[in-house]
Image (cartoon, rainbow, N blue to C red):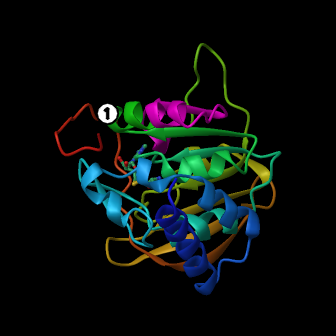
């Protein structure tokens, strides 16, 4: 890494601090993940700016501030098993992989999932399991094995009115889920806490702009996706 790159990283971290991110573990995870590896070649110059960028297939890599805020809100520890819905390019997942024990991530675009997995491998992130599936249904039963409930769930695409029931069902009692909820243009990031088998508390975190959660797996492929 050259001095210019190091300076860009430091500038981003200072920017996130100025915007109110205080968790130093979250800030250092963001500093460690090479965001330039997650964006298309033609956007590399902007990779360390605090902005969302297109990654192809009409999807985006989230703004670092939003990644930081979602991660900080969950209060991730190194004992946590996390479920992420909406892998995209894999950036948020990579940040989580430095903080959690294990991260399971689901993406509905097969092409994006394959690409993200290649990045995890290249970066040596071995505590991530990635699949292409419909994340609105939660982690599937694979070879007869039902997943254990998760400590934390993070959804990086917006639900129309409330979190999918399958995700609520897969959250541990005491666990937290962060998810954007609402119509396009009026989404609020919400933090759910499962207080007991039946009861939840909900807190509004901030207004956000995410692509919508969509059902089913897509095998669509186009040339503008991240290479
Ligand atoms: N986490 C990413 C941002 C992803 S953008 C980052 O770090 O930058 C949202 C992603 O959610 C898109 O890639 C979209 O294809 C995916 N998505 C939408 N609905 C989904 C579903 N039902 N299951 C899994 N992924 C879904």
Quadrant of the drawing holding the C terminus: top left
Which residue is tagged 1? 111
Above or below, 188 relative to 88: below
| Residue 19 image point, x, y percent | 58, 84
Above or below, 206 relative to 48: below
SS at circle 1? helix
Q: Report the magenta residues as a range.
A: 117-137
**Residue 123 belongs to magenta span:** yes
Q: Residue at x 53, y 53 (%)?
A: 92
**Between 79 and 189, the one nearer to me in the picture:** 79
Q: Quadrant of residue 160?
A: bottom left
**Between 18 and 211, the one nearer to me in the picture:** 18
| Residue 4 image point, x, y percent | 47, 66
| Residue 201 image point, x, y percent | 72, 69
Q: For the view shown, which residue lies furthest in the top direction? A: 143
Q: In which quarter of the image is residue 18?
A: bottom right
- 139 to the left or right of 184: right
Q: Which residue is drawn at 35% across and 43% down?
A: 215
Q: For the view shown, which residue lies furthest in the left direction? A: 223
**Between 210 and 14, the one nearer to me in the picture:** 14
Above or below, 201 relative to 141: below
Q: Residue at x 54, y 80 (%)?
A: 206
- 183 to the left or right of 197: left
Q: Quadrant of residue 82?
A: top right
Residue 217 in sight in this render: no
């Amino acid at each position: 890494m050259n001095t210019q790159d190091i300076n860009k990283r430091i500038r981003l971290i200072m920017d996130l601090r100025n915007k109110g991110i205080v968790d130093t573990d979250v800030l250092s995870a963001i500093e460690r993940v090479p965001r330039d590896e997650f964006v298309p070649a033609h956007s590399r110059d902007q990779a360390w700016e605090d902005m969302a960028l297109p990654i192809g297939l009409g999807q985006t890599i989230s703004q670092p501030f939003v990644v930081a805020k979602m991660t900080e809100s969950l209060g991730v520890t190194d004992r946590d098993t996390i479920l992420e819905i909406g892998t995209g390019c894999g950036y948020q997942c990579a940040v989580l992989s430095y903080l959690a024990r294990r991260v399971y991530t689901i993406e509905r675009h097969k092409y994006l999932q394959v690409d993200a997995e290649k990045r995890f491998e290249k970066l040596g992130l071995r505590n991530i399991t990635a699949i292409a599936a419909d994340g609105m249904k939660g982690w599937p039963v694979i070879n007869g094995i039902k997943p254990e409930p998760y400590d934390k769930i993070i959804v990086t695409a917006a639900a129309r009115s409330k979190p999918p029931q399958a995700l609520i069902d897969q959250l541990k009692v005491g666990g937290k889920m962060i998810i954007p909820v609402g119509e396009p243009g009026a989404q609020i990031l919400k933090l759910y806490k499962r207080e007991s088998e039946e009861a939840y508390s909900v807190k509004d975190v901030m207004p956000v702009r995410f692509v919508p959660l969509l059902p089913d797996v897509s095998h669509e492929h186009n040339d503008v996706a991240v290479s």
